[in-house]
Each structure stands twice: as C-alpha cells, then as structure tokens.
Amino acid sequence: MPDGSSVPVMLFESDIPPRWDSAVIVVFPGLGIPAGYYQLFARALTARGFHVAVADLRGQGDSRPKPSSASTYGYHELVSVDFPAVFEVVRERFENATPYALGHSMGGQLASLYASRIRGRLGGLILVASGSPYHRGFGVARGTSLFVGAAAMSLTSSIAGFWPGDRIDIGGFGRQSKVLIEDWSRFARTGKIEPSGADIDYEERIGRLKLPILALTFEGDDMAPKASMANLLEKFPRADITSDHLLEPRGHIEWIRQPETVAERVERWFMR
C-alpha cells in the first residue's frame, strides 16, 4: 500500500469445470478475523468450481504493521486504496474470471462501499452474517448497549490513539485503527455510512446499484441478526436481492468452521 503497509492475498485456483461462466469470489473477513481462518471455506468453494481469493483487512492477520497511533485508515481508505489493490492481484491471476465480492460481518459493509465506487465491475455481492451495525436493528436492550458501547469505543480509541483490542477484549475485534473504529461507531449510532475522508456520498451511490446480491443470515447470530441485515439491504433499493436465513450452523462465525452449507448456498445462487 502507499503508506508501506502490506496486505496479503491468498489465491485458490479451482480445477473443477463450473456449470456457469468462470467466477472468482473475493472474500473479505470480519473485524478481528484473520484471512487464514477462511481457508476451509475457500476450499469448499474451489471444490464447486469457483476460483477464490481471501485478503486480510489492513492491520489484521498477516498484514503489517499492526495498528498504532500512527494508523489513520478507516472505511474509506480500505475501499478506495486497499480493495482496488487486492482486485488488481486477483485480475492478474484470474484475468478471464468475473469477480464477486463476498464479505463477512464488517467485510460485507466494506464490500458494499467498494461496489458503490466501481459500479458495474463486479458480477455481484455476497453478504454473509453481515449487516448494518445500527443500534436500532438489535432490539431495545442490546441496541442500547451497542449505542453506548460504540460511543465508548470511539472515545477510548481517540484517547489511546488506536483501539487497544489486544488488551480490552470487547467483541473480539482485536487491535484496530482509531479511524476505523470511529467510522464503525458513527455507523452504529446513526445508521448512516459517513466514513471519515469520504470523497463520494456512499449512501447515494449504494442506492443506485443494480447488481445481484445474496444475503445470508444465521439463527443465533446476535452480532448480525436479521434486522441488522435488513437495515443494510434497505440501502440497495434497486439491487436484485436474494435473502436466506440459515438455521444451521448457528451463530456469527461457526459457518466458517462448517463451510459446506454456505458454499452450497452460494453455488445454488449462481445456478439460479
């Protein structure tokens, strides 16, 4: 990256002839989750004829350096600088494949912003256990806690110069850039996508997108419940949305350890 940061990209090539045009699925992790955690899922997709790339988010996994008070990146820089670099690597390896962005949790939020920037150059968007962090999508009790917690995280990050998730284990987010946490906190408190340093109106651009979207939620996922996903999908009034709520595996991350259900659902979406 221009600031000297490195963001590894793992590439998985399928040798199974697909029953659709060649596609490469580019996976973006949730906050605090290393890219390497998604290798089982990547292999489940390659077994179904998809090429796959999995990229760490800056500052996570094998990305270097780790976040510090010198880190000034947030949603906007990730989708305007890092994501284009990741897709350039993908195009070099799979030059004839159509790219699809798959985002888990915050990765889905970021993939949505990226899609709004490039308009028409993605085959589609796949949102898995993702959604808006807006507190009104989490019920009264949890929503109130989320609102207060988001404000506290932003304040802590501002004072410390970064989010010290390696010392304060809240949400399993890990150590993060203060700007990224401030962007997430603003989204959680207001429900609006207004990242620091934005050069476009992301909400307006997302509202224009007509691309196909697969949105998957899971029973027992209190970090991205159905209402959270619904709040994010409301921002795509012109998109061709397919939604599915899966009863198994349960929770926010168990699907990564048991990837066959999601891989099968993605394959079925391509065959529609």
Image (cartoon, rainbow, N blue to C red):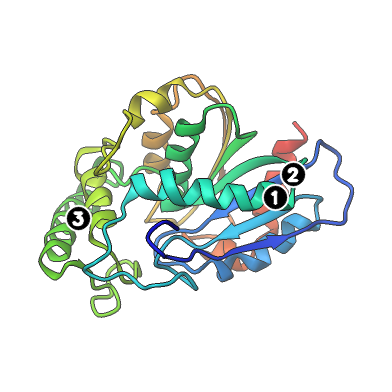
Q: Residue at x 28, y 63 (%)?
A: 71
Question: Which residue position is annotated with label 2?
Answer: 95
Three-letter code for the amino acid on which mark 1 is drawn: Glu
Tell me if 215 is positioned left or right of 137 in this view: right
> Callout 3 environment at 10 Å: few (<14), some (14 to 19), or many (20+)?
many
Disc 2 from disc 1: Cα separation: 6 Å
Residue at image x 43%, y 48%? Answer: 81
User: Is there CB contact under 8 Å for labels 2 and 1?
Assistant: yes
**Label for residue 39?**
none
Q: Residue furthest bottom?
A: 167
Question: Residue 43, image x and y in percent?
Answer: 73, 63
Mark 1 = which residue?
Answer: 92
Query: Closer to the observer: label 3 or label 1?
Result: 1
Q: Vertically, is 73 above or below 229?
A: below
Q: Which residue is mark 3?
A: 150
Disc 3 to disc 2, how far (Cα)? 41 Å
Amino acid type assigned to the residue bearing label 2 in the image:
Glu
**Whether residue 167 is situated above or below residue 98 in the rendered picture:** below
Q: Earlier in the sequence, mark 3 or mark 2?
A: 2
Find residue 161 and report its horizontal and vertical position in percent.
17, 67
Instruction: Identify residue type, mark 3.
Output: Ala
Q: How many marks?
A: 3
Instruction: Categorize mark 1 by other alpha carbons within 10 Å: few (<14), some (14-19), many (20+).
Output: few
Q: Earlier in the sequence, mark 3 or mark 1?
A: 1
Where residue 146 sits in the image (x, y, percent)? Answer: 22, 54
